[in-house]
Image: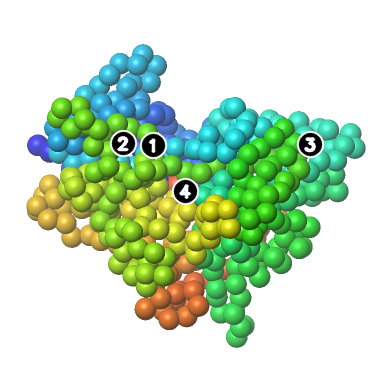
Amino acid sequence: MSKVVIIGAGFAGHTAALYLGSALGKRHEITVVNKHDYFLFIPSLVWVGVGHMKPEKTYFKLAPVYRKVHVNFVHGSATEVHPDEQFVVAQRAGNGEKVKLDYDYLIIATGPKLNFEGTKNLGPHHGFTHSICTLDHAVQTRDKYLELLERMKKGEKFKIVIGTGHPAATCQGAAFEYLSNIHKDLVKKGLRDKAELVWLSNEPRLGDFGVKGIEIKKNGRLLTSEDWLRDIFSQYDIKWEIQKGAYAVGEKTIYWEDLQGNKGETSYDFAMLIPQFLGSPMKYLDRDGNDISSKVVNKAGLVLVDAIYGLDYEQLEQTPNAWPAVYQNPSYKNIFAAGIAFAPPGPISRPSVNPNGLSITPAPPRTGMVSGIIGRIVAKNVIDLIKRGRMTHAERMSEMFAACIASMGDSLWDGEAGIMIIYPVVPDMRKYPNEMGRDNFVTHMELGLAGAWMKRMIHTTFMWKFQARPGWSIIPE
């Protein structure tokens, strides 16, 4: 009997658990460790944050789902990994009891550590800004936003700043969704004239989104995501400030450096800024208790996998196979990483360093659909190894298709969503020798009401299917 431990139950970890449980659960031991006892559908926190969805509609309990596919569940946090002896130490939530979990294969799918500490006074706990990155954060942000609305109804005016709160932050898409939903909500409530909306981002260009932007052919001409977002922001009367890396936050001021090396500030009354994402902090120890983290993770705590590290951007841009294919640690072949937890070989967007030596570069997004795809690949390879002794599945982000539906108002009658389809996620300049390194026949952007319906359908279908039929997956085979 083989033992598989999965740390984390987000899109990557939960997908892996369902595949493994369905294929192996009756004959082998599959265990998931997660700090929360629920699966959280993070994309819908955008709606929670404006008061349009109840928090309880965004999550479901994990243990009942895992029981159906013969997967064990530990509600707690993994604190130590012992790769030589092949066990994980976890601490149960609530009573703090330590649990030792032996493994033959380990999948690390922890999601990010939200590095609010990387920007002075950033975040909802010890800072002045808000967040929609977790359920608790989204609820707190909703409450503050609703308080703001009550004051607007009395005639007060406010400046609302949404975007990224660190020079290396990613997940610009979620911030864009939140800003768009605020705009739509204010319009519906007749309060749009009471708010100045500002987009603040570390992107080198508007619409970069950490993926080097998007370019499509439409009606015989090229259209870029920069053009697309510029039109949307102009229509919505949203100001934008890009190429800015926030380094500190005051009670009413965001302090930043820009690509030219200038220091400046942006005032605000209400701000939601996405922090930098780091790897989840865990100890990696050898038989004698010595730190061997350098063999497993990089300095940011992200798991080293079968990527080619150390290439400069020009080399990386011309080397699509530098991106990992099986997400396997080179030092410990029975350790895999999925989703945000794996260390990419570099950025997708062209990196920028200002004259002061500050890198202002969006990190590559590895969330949502991408995380689910990688979780499936890793799970199927672990299944292969247990059943056949060899892996048969591989997919690099430079070979991967991904779709993003960005909510821009959740109403099914007059809402909107931006649909963005990218192939491949990481450009392949050799296969597609155009400006963006992508297939212009597949890559696409569309804006409209149909997207709002699709976004709601994905939420409803995912939440229902992953509870009622845990062997089912929305990730295509």
Residue at x-position 39% and y-position 64%:
312
The quadrant in which residue 325 appears is bottom left
The residue beneath circle 1 is 280
Residue type at mark 3: give it: Leu
Judged from the image, the secondary structure of the residue bearing numbered disc 3 is helix
Judged from the image, the secondary structure of the residue bearing numbered disc 1 is loop
Q: Which mark is residue 7?
A: 2
Location of residue 95 in the rendering, given as x and y in whole percent from the top left corner: 36, 14
Q: Left or right? Give the position of 59 relative to 147.
A: left
Location of residue 8 in the rendering, given as x and y in whole percent from the top left corner: 35, 37
Tag 2 or tag 3, which sits nearer the N-term? 2
Q: Quadrant of the N terminus?
A: top left
Is the residue under label 1 in contact with that under label 2 (CB below 8 Å)?
yes
Residue type at mark 2: give it: Ile
Tag 1 or tag 2, which sits nearer the N-term? 2
The residue beneath circle 4 is 461
Judged from the image, the secondary structure of the residue bearing numbered disc 2 is strand
Q: Which mark is residue 227?
A: none
